[in-house]
Amino acid sequence: MPSKNKFYVTTPIYYVTAKPHLGSLYSTLIADVLARWHKLKGEKIFFLTGTDEHGQKVAQAAQQASKDPKAFVDSFIPAYQDAWKTYEIDYTKFIRTTDPAHIMGAQHFVRHLLATGDIYKDSYSGWYCTPCETFITPKEMEKDEVQPLCISCTRTTTKVAEETYFFKLSAYQDKLLKFYADNPNFIMPKERLHEIISFVESGLKDLSISRTTVKWGIPFPDDAEHILYVWIDALSNYITGVGYGNSGDEENFNFWWPADVQVLGKDIIRFHGVYWIAFLMAAGLPLPKQMLVHGWIKVNEQKMSKSLGNVVDPMVLQTTYGVDPVRYYLMRYIPINQDGDFSIESLERAIEKDLANDLGNLLNRMLILAEKNNMYTIRHSVVWEQSAINLRDECLNMLTEVLNHMEDCMFHMALARIWKFIHQVNVYFHENEPWKLAQTNPKLFEQVLSATCHSLRTIGILLSPIMPEKMAALLMSLGVSIDQHKNILQELVQNDWHHTFVLLKTAALFHKPETEKKMEQPEIAEKQKEQEQQTYITIEDLIKVELVVGTIEQCERVEQSDKLLKMQIDLGDKGKRQILAGIRQSYAPEELIGRQGLFVINLKPRKMAGLESQGMMLIAKDATGKTQLMSPAQLVPNGTRLQ
Ligand code: ME8
Ligand code: MG
């Protein structure tokens, strides 16, 4: 089939019972990054986001606020639109389920399902969880339970007994299982597919898709006693948003549907991976190509959520830290395939270390040095020195790996790989001592600047979907402009270092968080207090500790843990050891491989996250929580004991 060169991406539509929080931003940001990434490939983009405004949950919240439901939902819309605008969320359309076009489309969808015979009327009696807007299936209840708790959110449920329209979900069990088997990449990350398969395998009951005891919703076609169950209303936004059910828009709908990627959190995977797919199968519509399911942002081990009241307001966060640094932090340090803890501490560390020190300073040093020597136009070399050739090869290696990670939507891996390259560029710049070359060898001086500019150009383009504004500034300071209609990634992969750069002085891209501006971190003060309480040990105590120099040969993340890295350490004549350390927030594994460190090797082996750690690595943490690996200032043979 000829490719349409299009990319259609969606986010969940959020319940408008409050303004957006960091969790809602996270899903929306992932979709934005994907959309911008595909734009770099020259594809046409449709990016749909919006709000889920009907149903019992919203109606109850409106009632509590003594407001009419429509006035209540209207009051939050500016907060969503402002937040998305501030965070550079470049959506194509913001859909509201109260939009007339959506209402028409959703009714059309249900009429279609009625016509195919997949809907019948009966009575329903059971339990309902309002916060999740979900019916509790008998399987999810303990036997003889009086009032079950919701298995998803553990809150109390309410009894519902009413006449309802059912969708024949049970008829789709085999078709769904076949679909999953035929499309193993349908759900990313792949682990999440098993969850769906076992839910479907355990048996599907027909699904109630209308309510009579709730009034705030879309009228059921030709039966005004009923309103649409909020999930069938909400899910259909993904098709109504591109024109389904609205005459005149068929061409638009046929062009964009099916969605290429649907982004969602793991809490709503069943609605998307099972119900939504079955509805579409019943309607005979094409199925979405992929669902990208992410984990939860947590605060102190708890899911960040409106109902738990532990939310972080992205609008407050950006006033202190800026938009692009928050975007970067979320994409790099909340791995998409697992839950991630949000902390101010690690956000500040990311800004200081990765953005201000590693990337910002590199650009700055290069620009200042060029200016000092009146070099504003940097020409490429015809013959490159070996060190520049090596850097150029590394640039291509990095690109290849980053492209793969981005195809897998492993954003955190892509970013770690880009940062490894940034380190290499820093080393190249430093080792070539261009400030000396400026006096002794102007030609080579220009070459070092040129190699650095070429590297920064690639870095800036690759990072532009993550930090659009900062990378636009970076590229502008190099005199680079991007042609929106070309596949720029394809050009990058050619890795031709033949550009001329016209430098423009620019304000520093990133600022280290200033101490007086930093947000509250009470836990840090506690830690400092603990450290201040000194007690003495004797020299005999000290020599009991066997402290040895070793080289980190291998290093990888421990899947089950947000904090741990697993390392293989070469201790020379003392052999090899597996050692685990809680430094994952400070170092990407690649950064550590090949480096020397100091290790306690006679500590009793202990299990961490189910793995044995045969010693301990020495690290230092400063007051901001930044971790530093302790290493000898110069290379020392592995196995050397400290004295
Ligand atoms: O479920 N971490 O809306 P909702 C990461 N209206 N993501 C989070 C999060 C967190 N702590 N908290 C929320 C609904 N999210 C329905 C969806 S779609 C047809 C209807 C994100 O307001 C995540 O994507 O409860 C989650 O799936 C979504 O917000 C739920 O938002
Ligand atoms: Mg929710």
Image (cartoon, helix red, strand yellow):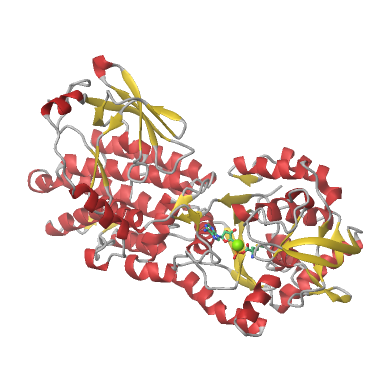
Whether residue 384 can be seen here? no
Q: Considering only vertical position in the picture, is 60 above or below 38? A: below
Please report the residue visible at 50 percent of the width from the left and 41 percent of the height from the top: 404
Which sits in the foreground, 62 or 9? 62
* The one of 42 and 609 positioned closer to us in this rendering: 609
Quadrant housing the C terminus: top left
Name the image quarter holding residue 275. Answer: bottom right
400 over 283 or under it: above or below: above
Q: Can residue 65 be seen from the camera position used here?
A: yes
Q: Quadrant of residue 569?
A: top left
Q: How many marks?
A: 0
Left or right: 217 as drawn, with respect to 361: right
**Residue 459 locus on image (x, y percent):** 36, 50
Above or below, 48 relative to 567:
below
- Residue 577 placement (x, y as % from top left): 34, 22
Ligand 2 lies in which image quarter?
A: bottom right
Picture coordinates of residue 4, whole percent (x, y): 65, 54
Q: Is residue 623 left or right of residue 277?
A: left
Q: Residue at x 31, y 56 (%)?
A: 523
Where residue 383 appears, as percent x and y from the top left, is: 25, 38
Q: Is 90 placed above or below 265 here? A: below
